[in-house]
Image (cartoon, rainbow, N blue to C red):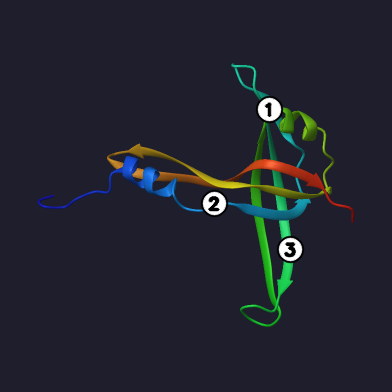
Amino acid sequence: MGGETRPNPDVIVAEATRAANFVELEGRLIEPVDFRVTPAGRAVAMLELEHLSSHDDPEPGLRLEARMVVVAMGPLAERYRACAVGSRLLVQGRLNQKRWIRDDRVRWGRLELLAREIQRVDS
């Protein structure tokens, strides 16, 4: 449509690489670990965590609830492949959201946490 400019996805990605992207999330494993090995032989584990917390900032008594899929790869995936449902985990990593282009539009998939480190947390 005349004169309309669309954002270039490559430029968006290049700009995003300069921004900070570090997440630390503590939560309980709520589903069995989905463990797979890619055709290239790389181990991948998908862990679904539920985070519950309460805070007084920015509002007194604010209750936060979130579910996040955590993706662990390689040796980290192997280490947590048999983690029990209900386990409390602390995950450090970065956010990722897959995208694709269909009908000349950028489409976004689910937001996930790509794990760099996972630790079990004592209850």
The residue drawn where x is 79% and y is 45% is 119
Q: Disc 2 marks which residue?
A: 21
Label 2 crowd (10 A; few <14 / some 14-19 / many >=20): few
Would you place residue 6 above or below residue 42 in this image? below
Relative to residue 21, is residue 3 drawn left or right?
A: left
Mark 3 → mark 1, Cα distance in angstroms: 28 Å
Mark 3 → mark 2, Cα distance in angstroms: 22 Å
Residue 71 on image: x %, y %: 64, 39
Q: Disc 1 marks which residue?
A: 74
Marks 3/1 in contact by CB < 8 Å: the verdict is no
The residue drawn where x is 66% and y is 41% is 116
Would you place residue 33 above or below residue 122 in this image? above
Mark 2 → mark 1, Cα distance in angstroms: 21 Å
Residue 62 on image: x %, y %: 67, 76
Amino acid at pointer 1: Gly
Q: Disc 3 marks which residue?
A: 52
Amino acid at pointer 3: Leu
Relative to residue 110, is residue 50 drawn left or right?
A: right
Which callout, 2 or 1, points to the residue nearer the camera? Answer: 2
